Amino acid sequence: MYRIASGNKIAIQVLIPLAVALSGLASSVHAADAVDADAANALAKRNDCFKCHAIDKTKKGPSYKKIAAKYKGKPEGEDKAIKNMTTGPKVKLEDGTEEEHKVIDTKDPKELKNLAQWILSR
């Protein structure tokens, strides 16, 4: 434990408000990065993503929970999800067959990032 000499009252008066301000800044940065679930869901619906994927059930493609589990803790997960949605690669389906993944109808990086983060947060 640290002791603060009586001459350090000014330091305390500066440090406490600074710590409070920084904690507020950290929470506002986190809030700015929050996923817009409504926008992600709307984009997924508009692109018929739910034809092959569901949140927690396997359909023609893996559930979003399964995709999120695959990339949990892996920094490349978001980039791989976006690449899969934008390049139309061949994907292996749950029944073992392969087909080209549908290319999503937006080029907006914010929309793509939001959708990828939404999927990976399931």
Image (cartoon, helix red, strand yellow):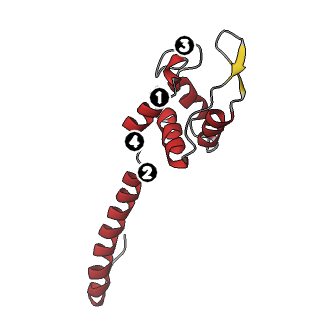
- Can you identify the residue that label 3 sits on? 59
Q: Residue at x 29, y 80 (%)?
A: 12
> For the residue labelled by badge 4, is the local secondary structure a helix, a strand or a loop?
loop
Q: Which image quadrant is residue 104 in?
A: top right
Q: Are marks 2 and 1 in contact (CB under 8 Å)?
A: no
Q: Secondary structure at mark 1?
A: helix
Q: Please, what is the three-letter code of the amino acid marked with disc 4?
A: Asp
Q: Which residue is mark 1?
A: 46
Quadrant including the N terminus: bottom left
Q: Nearer the viewer, mark 3 or mark 1?
A: 1
* Image x and y of residue 78, in percent: 59, 41
Q: In terms of depth relative to the viewer, which is nearer, 110 or 58?
A: 110
Q: Does residue 16 appear left or right of residue 69 in this picture? A: left
- Rounded to the nearest whole Å, what is the CA distance between mark 3 and mark 1? 18 Å
Using the image, determine if residue 17 lies above or below residue 35.
Answer: below
The amino acid at mark 2 is Asp
Q: Say the numbered circle drawn on residue 2.
A: none
